[in-house]
Image (cartoon, rainbow, N blue to C red):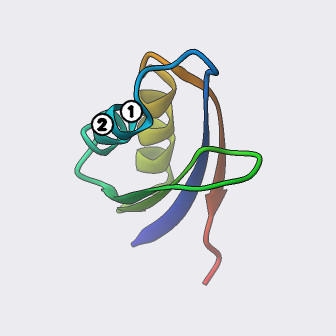
Amino acid sequence: MVYAYIMVKAAPVSDSIDQLKQELLAVSDGIVSAHIVAGDVDFIVKVEVDTPADVKDIAGGIQSVPGIEDTQTYIAMD
C-alpha cells in the first residue's frame, strides 16, 4: 500500500471552498480524506493506493479540477 499526501492550492477566484472539497473527493476512490486548512495551501488530501503510479494519476486528476491552481505531492516513507 502506498500512502501519500497532496497539498492543494485553489485559485483565488474559485467556487465555494466546500464545493471544491467535494469535487476533490470525487476524483478517485483512492482519496481517503480531504481537509480544508489554513496556511500556504488550501487542502491536504490523503491518498491510499496500490502503486506510486496511482498516486500520480490522482494528482493529475486533482490538477484537472477547475479552480485548482497548484499541487505538491508527498509520498510517505513508512
Q: In which quarter of the image is the N terminus?
A: bottom left
Which residue carries the number 1 mark? 20
Does 77 sit above or below residue 55? Answer: below
* Side (left or right) of 32 relative to 13: left
> Which image quadrant for residue 11?
top right
Q: For the C terminus, give its image quadrant.
A: bottom right
Q: How far is mark 1 from mark 2, CA to CA? A: 11 Å
Residue positioned 40% across, 28% down in the render:
16
State the image coordinates of residue 31 (x, y, percent, origin top left).
34, 54
Q: Mark 2 points at which residue?
A: 27
Residue 22 lies in quadrant: top left
Q: Residue lying at the far bottom in this picture: please name it.
A: 78
SS class of the residue under badge 1? helix
SS under mark 2: loop
Residue 50, compared with residue 40, is above or below; it is: below
Residue 52 circle label = none
User: Which amino acid type is shown beneath numbered disc 1?
Assistant: Leu
At a point 68% along the width and 45% down the height, the residue shown is: 41
Which amino acid does the dot numbered 2 rest on? Answer: Val
Viewer-side label of 1, 2: 1
Where residue 28 appears, as percent x and y from the top left, is 27, 43
Q: How crowded is mark 1: few (under 14 residues within 10 Å), some or many (20 or more)?
A: some
Q: Which residue is found at the position 44% from the left and 16% from the top?
A: 66
* Residue 10 relative to residue 64: left or right: right
